[in-house]
Image: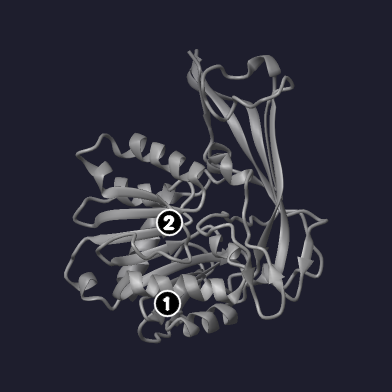
């Protein structure tokens, strides 16, 4: 009998630009220059299975290895030196794949527990279901994971014990549209982290910001495959695809606020409408008679520069100490071929290290570390 699945790979139409729109409430925020509505989504992120499938090409296991290694390298906490297991906080966690990989791939002696937070209750419910599947029944590793619906600008009260490291991945900080919101988030994290703790922030690469003279279409395709028996053993046949658009040519861009109103669209389709998988899979329940599920909306997201992150971090009491071009220690932010993200680290003392450039931000409590 055939088994349906999706490949954990993607075919990119253009430069990948990923993010998630969670972790803050729906109130309107104010800047000194203009009224800017809080970035939010009521459609894309209320369909977690589609979102999960769209970003399934990410290698969460390897990315978590990078995150843990970078924390060990840059943390000035005594915990990192005494082999005390880590307590992790992931903001705007979505399907919680990084959180769950940290727990499933590492024993309690390395990772003690993870708390995930997301603005979308649908994402929280979906991530909790993923935890039940990936971590097993209560009484084991499942008890080390907690998912909370909340605002990433205020993480107080999530735990009576401080965290060692916090993660803000997949461009989620882009949904904090004002400086006030970013500073609130960082200040709140400072109080939630142990002294010497770290924060990792992943954002689009700066070259994307400085190419905004006109908007371009970004997208990729995830194939759906069917795995079944054949005379030669197991074989895979594509029976559909998920097409993702993350930004289109006619998007509005506000150069003053640095906010692009991203067109985000996903189209899930099967090759044969009569071949729509039966059952209660949320991926296929909403398919029309033509074998398609479509969702589209406009999501405002801010574009950041490295200098801005440094300045905002200092306003919140951090210093930047490390940056990379991907969630990969080998990718420098200046790498024209492989650098596609901005990863930075914040910490108590300013450390300059010529080997580390990532367009993800690592932040340690009371300081921002950026390796140059």
Quick check: 37 left or right of 324? right
Residue 327: x percent and y percent? 47, 62
Name the residue rendered at 40%, 64% in the picture.
Answer: 155
Residue 350: x percent and y percent? 40, 87
Decide: is 154 above or below 42: below
Residues at marks 1 and 2, CA–CA distance in whole angstroms: 18 Å
In the image, which is nearer the foreground, mark 1 or mark 2?
A: 1
- Tell me, for residue 63, which label it has, or none: 2
- Residue 341 in sight: no
| Foreground pick, 125 / 171 | 125
Q: Which of the 4 image quarters holds residue 345?
A: bottom left
Q: For the view shown, which residue lies furthest in the left direction?
A: 82
At mark 2, the secondary structure is helix
Residue 94: x percent and y percent? 49, 49
Q: Which of the 4 image quarters holds residue 226?
A: top right
Q: Earlier in the sequence, mark 1 or mark 2?
A: 2
Decide: is 71 above or below 246: below
Which residue is denoted by mark 1 in the rendering?
346
Mark 2 nearby-residue class (10 Å; few <14, some 14–19, many ≥20): some
Name the residue rendered at 42%, 77% in the picture.
Answer: 346
Residue 335: x percent and y percent? 58, 70
At mark 1, the secondary structure is strand
Q: For the view shown, which residue lies furthest in the front direction?
A: 27
Quick check: 264 left or right of 278? right
């Amino acid at each position: 009998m055939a088994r349906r699945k999706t490949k954990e790979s993607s075919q990119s139409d253009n430069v990948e630009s990923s993010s998630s729109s969670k972790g803050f409430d729906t109130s309107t925020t104010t800047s000194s220059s203009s009224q800017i509505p809080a970035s939010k989504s009521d459609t894309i992120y209320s369909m977690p299975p589609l979102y999960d499938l769209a970003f399934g090409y990410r290698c969460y296991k390897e990315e978590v290895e990078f995150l843990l290694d970078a924390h060990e390298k840059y943390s000035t906490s005594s915990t990192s030196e005494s082999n005390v297991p880590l307590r992790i906080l992931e903001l705007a966690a979505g399907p919680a794949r990084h959180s769950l990989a940290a727990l499933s791939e590492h024993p309690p002696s390395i990772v003690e527990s993870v708390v995930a937070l997301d603005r979308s209750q649908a994402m929280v419910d979906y991530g909790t279901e993923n935890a039940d599947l990936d971590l097993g029944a209560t009484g084991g590793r499942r008890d080390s994971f907690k998912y909370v619906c909340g605002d990433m600008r205020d993480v107080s009260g999530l735990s009576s014990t401080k965290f060692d490291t916090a993660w803000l991945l997949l461009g989620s900080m882009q949904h904090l549209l004002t400086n006030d919101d970013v500073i609130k988030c960082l200040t709140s994290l400072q109080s939630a982290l142990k002294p010497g703790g770290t924060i990792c922030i992943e954002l689009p690469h700066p070259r994307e910001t400085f190419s905004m003279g006109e908007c371009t279409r970004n997208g990729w395709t995830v194939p759906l495959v069917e795995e079944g028996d054949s005379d030669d053993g197991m074989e895979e046949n594509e029976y559909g695809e998920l097409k993702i658009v993350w930004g289109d040519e006619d998007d509005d861009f506000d150069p003053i606020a640095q906010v692009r109103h991203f067109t985000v669209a996903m189209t899930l389709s099967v090759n044969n409408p009569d071949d729509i998988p039966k059952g209660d899979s949320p991926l296929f329940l909403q398919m029309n008679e033509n074998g398609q599920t479509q969702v589209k909306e406009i999501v405002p997201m801010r574009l950041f520069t490295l200098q801005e992150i440094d300045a905002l971090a200092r306003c919140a009491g951090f210093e930047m100490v490390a940056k990379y071009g991907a969630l990969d220690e080998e990718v420098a932010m200046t790498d024209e071929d492989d650098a596609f993200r901005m990863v930075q680290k914040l910490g108590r003392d300013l450390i300059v290290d010529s080997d580390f450039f990532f367009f993800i931000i690592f932040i340690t409590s009371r300081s921002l570390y950026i390796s140059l």
